[in-house]
Image: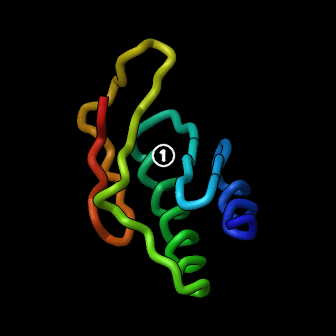
Amino acid sequence: MDACTILIKSHVYDVLAYTDNSLIMWQASNRRGIERTDHTVSNLLDKWCEENKMTVAPTKSEVMIFTRTGSPRLKREPMIEIVYKIVPVVR
């Protein structure tokens, strides 16, 4: 996972990975920025998994949004995808 972590870290705030669990953190000022970063990271992750014969389980994935004010100021929640499936936003 080190090669994947290094590749993704160039596009996000931080990546924490341990065995089969990972946490990818990024910051954006709006929903479009969140979705654009997700698209980039998701493509990198998909490519790395394919090259290394691994898969990501979108059903075991969740998105959590943190803000400085405690509540997101978004008209709608961002659509985060992993392996072409929408990942739920949890609170």
- How many neighbours does mark 1 have within 10 angstroms: few (below 14), some (14-19), or many (20 or more)? some
Q: Quadrant of the N terminus?
A: bottom right
Residue occupying the point 65% across, 47% down? 16
The mark total stands at: 1
Image position of 41 with respect to 48: above or below: above
Residue occupying the point 51% across, 16% down? 68
Residue occupied by mark 1: 33
The image shows residue 25 at horizontal and vertical percentages of 57, 42
The image shows residue 21 at horizontal and vertical percentages of 53, 54
Foreground of the two, 72 or 3? 3
Q: Quadrant of the C terminus?
A: top left
Residue occupying the point 48% across, 46% down? 33
User: Is 60 on the left-hand or right-hand side of 33?
Assistant: left
The image shows residue 41 at horizontal and vertical percentages of 54, 61
The image shows residue 4 at horizontal and vertical percentages of 67, 67
User: Is 26 on the left-hand or right-hand side of 86?
Assistant: right
Image position of 10 with respect to 67: above or below: below
